[in-house]
């Protein structure tokens, strides 16, 4: 019975993220062989192709303002996808250590209360990350359906040289430059849709993989806090049990530091890109409202929601990780520390000192990613957006 239970727990916590990241070769518990490398190369090439097509479309200069903004958005998504996939593959040991630790945690659950805490954090990870991904995949589908609908409604002949076609990824001029046949227009749309889905997976799928394991670490810190608070000083093996809690604390700090170091550079680039795109897409949304362009309003809202969800998840989970690490000290303070033997009390001091500088997700090692940073980015972006709106009205 217990064997079936932990199998169900592992499947519940990890299967969705395995299905998402296995196609791009970054699933930490996979066999790292030539086949996983080929999948990683495929995902990286698809994200790179989105960047190249969008950049060439801007360079060839046959796009309007709306398409230029779409190209810029796709370039940013592609760059983030390439960066995350390559970094998670090259520095895979950090994720492997964390996911193997999570696997061991599920195999060694000692009571129902700890299991409930772990299931709760697994549920939060599944719900938040999968909701973000489902919305993004739906947006990709819309980007493929719109060109096909316009093509079918116009009843155009794809062999006509004067036909102006729309594509999932803005690439009309680029494909014409390379003399790509218009006779396979629908197949081209499907291929670009596949490329878009893999690019989205390389970007947001890697985010989901990282945020899920970060939430698991937060759950383990939560369990450790409870163990510190409820520590029984009258137990016969109190020294051994307290040393076990100290070692667990050190181990969780090491796991959290590995995650923070892995994501540091990525977060720096991501925060910079999202800040710029919030201004640009917000300006496009304001302009669309002014001219009553319903299609543009919907598309702008869709893109804004995707980027805001990324920023929100990193900020909320980063803030949660930092607060959980800080509250280790509070949990010890709320315990009966005054009745501990002298040997244990000495160790309590060192734990309290460590909680003064808790592990946190940082962008470039100098910007802590939490709710305060989130509000600062939103305020700055909306300030620039207000200036742009005033310029538009003038």
Image: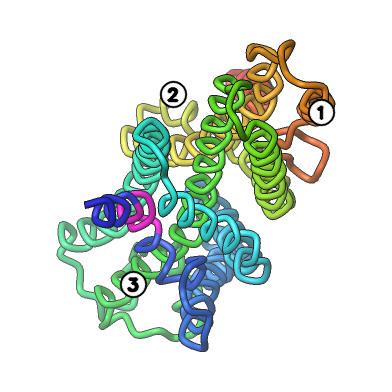
Taking the image as shown, residue 349 lies to the left or right of residue 304, namely right
Along the polypeptide, which appears first: circle 1 or circle 3? 3
Residue numbers of the magenta segment: 10-17
Residue under circle 3? Answer: 162
Taking the image as shown, residue 308 lies to the left or right of residue 296, namely right
Please state the horizontal and vertical placement of residue 44, each as a whole percent of the image: 54, 72
Q: Quadrant of the C terminus?
A: top right
Task: Give the main secondary structure, helix, strand or loop, of the magenta stretch.
Answer: helix
Q: Residue 73 in magenta? A: no
Marks 3 and 2 in Cβ contact (< 8 Å) = no
Q: Which mark is residue 290?
A: 2
**Residue at 28 percent of width and 57 percent of height:** 3
Residue under circle 1? Answer: 343
**Cα gap from disc 1 to disc 3, whole angstroms:** 85 Å
Please state the horizontal and vertical placement of residue 174, each as a whole percent of the image: 50, 74
User: Within the image, what quadrant is residue 7 found in?
Assistant: bottom left
Marks 2 and 1 in Cβ contact (< 8 Å) = no
Marks 1 and 3 in Cβ contact (< 8 Å) = no
Asked whether 341 or 160 is in front, the reply is 341
Q: Residue 13 in magenta? A: yes
**Residue at 63 percent of width and 14 percent of height:** 335
Q: Which mark is residue 101?
A: none
Along the polypeptide, which appears first: circle 2 or circle 1? 2
Taking the image as shown, residue 81 lies to the left or right of residue 131, namely right
Please state the horizontal and vertical placement of residue 275, each as a whole percent of the image: 65, 36
**In this view, the mark in front (3 or 2):** 2
**Residue at 50 percent of width and 43 percent of height:** 216
**Cα gap from disc 3 to disc 2, whole angstroms:** 32 Å
Along the polypeptide, which appears first: circle 3 or circle 2? 3
Asked whether 83 or 56 is in front, the reply is 83
**In this view, the mark in front (1 or 3):** 1
């Amino acid at each position: 019975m217990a064997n079936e239970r932990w199998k169900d727990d592992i499947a519940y916590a990890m299967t969705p993220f395995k299905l998402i990241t296995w196609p791009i070769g970054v699933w930490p518990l996979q066999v790292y062989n030539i086949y996983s490398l080929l999948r990683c190369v495929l995902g990286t090439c698809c994200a790179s192709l989105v960047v190249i097509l969008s950049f060439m479309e801007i360079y060839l200069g046959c796009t309007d303002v709306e398409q230029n903004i779409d190209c810029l958005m796709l370039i940013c998504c592609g760059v983030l996808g390439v960066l995350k996939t390559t970094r998670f593959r090259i520095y895979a040991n950090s994720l492997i250590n964390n996911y193997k630790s999570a696997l061991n945690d599920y195999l060694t659950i000692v009571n129902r209360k700890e299991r409930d805490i772990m299931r709760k954090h697994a549920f939060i990870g599944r719900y938040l990350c999968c909701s973000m991904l489902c919305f993004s995949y739906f947006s990709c589908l819309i980007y493929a359906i719109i060109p096909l609908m316009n093509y079918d409604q116009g009843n155009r002949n794809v062999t006509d040289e004067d036909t102006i076609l729309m594509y999932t990824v803005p690439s009309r001029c680029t494909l014409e430059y390379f003399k790509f046949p218009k006779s396979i227009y629908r197949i081209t749309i499907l291929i670009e849709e596949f490329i878009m889905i893999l690019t989205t997976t390389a970007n947001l799928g890697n985010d989901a993989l990282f945020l899920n394991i970060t939430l698991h670490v937060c759950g383990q810190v939560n369990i450790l806090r409870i163990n510190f608070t409820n520590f029984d000083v009258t137990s016969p093996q109190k020294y051994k049990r307290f040393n076990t809690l100290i070692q667990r604390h050190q181990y969780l700090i090491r796991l959290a530091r590995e995650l923070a170091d892995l994501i540091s550079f990525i977060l720096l680039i991501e925060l910079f890109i999202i800040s710029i795109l919030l201004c640009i897409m917000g300006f496009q949304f304001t302009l669309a409202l002014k001219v009553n362009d319903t299609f543009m309003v919907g598309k702008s809202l869709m893109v804004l929601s995707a980027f805001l969800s990324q920023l929100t998840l990193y900020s909320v989970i980063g803030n949660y990780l930092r607060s959980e690490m800080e509250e280790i000290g509070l949990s010890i303070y709320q315990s009966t520390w005054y009745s501990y033997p002298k040997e244990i009390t000495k160790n309590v001091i060192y734990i309290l000192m460590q909680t003064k500088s808790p592990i946190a997700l940082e962008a470039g090692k100098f910007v802590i990613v939490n709710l305060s940073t989130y509000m600062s980015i939103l305020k700055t972006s909306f300030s620039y957006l207000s200036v742009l709106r005033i310029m538009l009205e003038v």
